[in-house]
Amino acid sequence: MAEDEDVKPKLSLVLNHEGTQVTIKVKSTMPFKKIFEVAEKRFGKDPGTLKFVYEGNRLNGADTPAMLGMEEGDMIDAHLQQVSPCCHDDPERS
């Protein structure tokens, strides 16, 4: 009789940023906002620097892995936020 069976299930999510992957063990009911904070620290980024995408959809900080039916080992991609440049400098100048 394992008492752990009634505890909220934990799962490991893999976060990928520019080819670097980190695995974060989370409760399925943990809001993504907290997961994002941990991931940004692991990647050495400032809070709010990254956006997180799962199966082509941007994740909302208020959602949870359980709400999306995420499973053990699912991968979330982390991308740098696009910041509007103050000055246009076209790198494709020919």
Image (cartoon, helix red, strand yellow):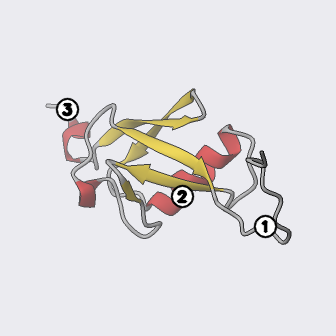
Q: Position of residue 81 (x, y in %)?
A: 64, 59
Could you tell whether 70 is left or right of 34 in the image? Answer: left
Q: Front-most of 3 and 46?
A: 46
* Disc 3/disc 1 C-alpha distance (Å): 55 Å
Could you tell whether 93 is left or right of 8 in the image? Answer: right
Could you tell whether 47 is left or right of 74 in the image? Answer: right
Q: Position of residue 70 (x, y in %)?
A: 26, 46
Residue position marked by numbered label 2 in the rendering: 34
Of the numbered discs in the image, which one, if any, rests on residue 10? none
Amino acid, disc 1: Pro
Of the numbered discs in the image, which one, if any, rests on residue 2? 3
Residue at image point 42% right, 44% down: 26
Mark 3 or mark 1: whose residue is earlier in sequence = 3
Q: Front-most of 52 and 88?
A: 88
For disc 1, the neighbor class at 10 Å (few under 14, some 14 to 19, many from 20) is: few
Of labels 3 and 1, the one closer to you:
1
Of labels 2 and 3, the one closer to you:
2
Q: Front-most of 8 and 88?
A: 88
Mark 1 or mark 2: whose residue is earlier in sequence = 2
In the rendered image, the vertical position of residue 1 relative to residue 81, given as above or below: above
**Residue furthest left as drawn:** 1
Amino acid, disc 3: Ala
Q: Position of residue 34 (x, y in %)?
A: 54, 58
Residue at image point 78% right, 49% down: 93
In the rendered image, the vertical position of residue 60 relative to residue 90, given as above or below: below
Element at badge 3? loop
Residue at image point 65% right, 48% down: 40
Residue position marked by numbered label 1 in the rendering: 85
Mark 2 or mark 3: whose residue is earlier in sequence = 3
